[in-house]
Amino acid sequence: MRRCSCARPWWSRRRRPGRRAEPRHGGRPGAAGLLPLPVGLGMLALAGCAPMPGQPTATAARRAVPVAELAARLPAEAAGFRRGATIALAQAGEEGRETAYRTLGRTAAGATVTLARLPGAAVPEGAEGPAVEAAFAALVQEATRPLPQQRLQDGPRFTLDGGLRCTETEGAYGRERVEGLLCAGGLGGGLLRLRVTMPQQDPAPADARAFASSILAALRVP
């Protein structure tokens, strides 16, 4: 088909094709019922550029959502994690909110969800783009930086639900083995950063990927 050219740890603070023109009034198909070749090709090209009714275009930008409005969408519970306190963030020109989550029980998993608005242009939606790449790289660098009591390693990168660039982590905090998840993505014109940390056990205290998916789904709701 022709392509158209237009268009941290937690307890220390995780065309339709063109067709022949139909003759009017029941007339017999023939040469008169066909568009001249140059005109027909031009109309087909234009038809390929026009979106179907109700279908968003690839370049359509979603409405930029204020950070406070996004933070208000965060659920009270997500995949067994309970929402905790939310604090305001203001660093490096960012406007943001950070919300803590944790599971119940003696052996708990913890997480932070950070929503930030960068100065300047809006961040495109999804797991791609320079702003998301930079945010994800900084998140991984911070989490894996060697500390006296913490040693973490990141694993292969993957995309979660088409909206988050993620990597799983594992290592040790003191003598305890830990694992977790790091994700970043563009959302509502800003950035979503997510970090989950938990003791490494079998079975695991929580499902980090399910938590990330639940948070993303809640924030995507218009």
Image (cartoon, helix red, strand yellow):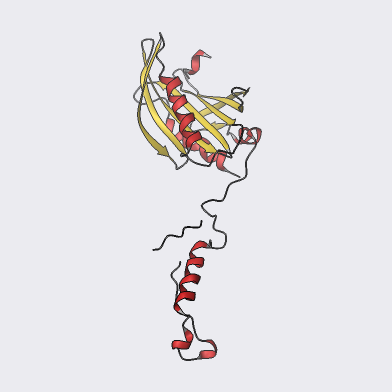
Q: Which quadrant is the C terminus positioned in? A: top right
Identified at 58% across, 30% down, the residue is 116
From the viewer's perspective, is residue 218 above or below residue 16? above
Based on the displayed image, in which of its 4 quarters is residue 2 positioned?
bottom left
Pinpoint residue 97: horizontal percent, then vertical percent.
61, 27
Q: Is residue 121 above or below residue 53?
A: above
Q: Is residue 69 left or right of residue 46?
A: right
Q: Residue at x 41, y 9 (%)?
A: 149
Q: Nearer the viewer, residue 181 or 136?
A: 136
Q: Position of residue 101 (x, y in %)?
A: 53, 25
The residue positioned 57% from the left and 26% from the top of the image is 99
- 89 in relation to 37, above or below: above
Residue at the far front in the pictured view: 38
The number of callouts visible is 0
Q: Quadrant of the N terminus?
A: bottom left
Q: Position of residue 83 (x, y in %)?
A: 57, 27
Q: Image point 45% across, 43% down: which residue?
A: 162
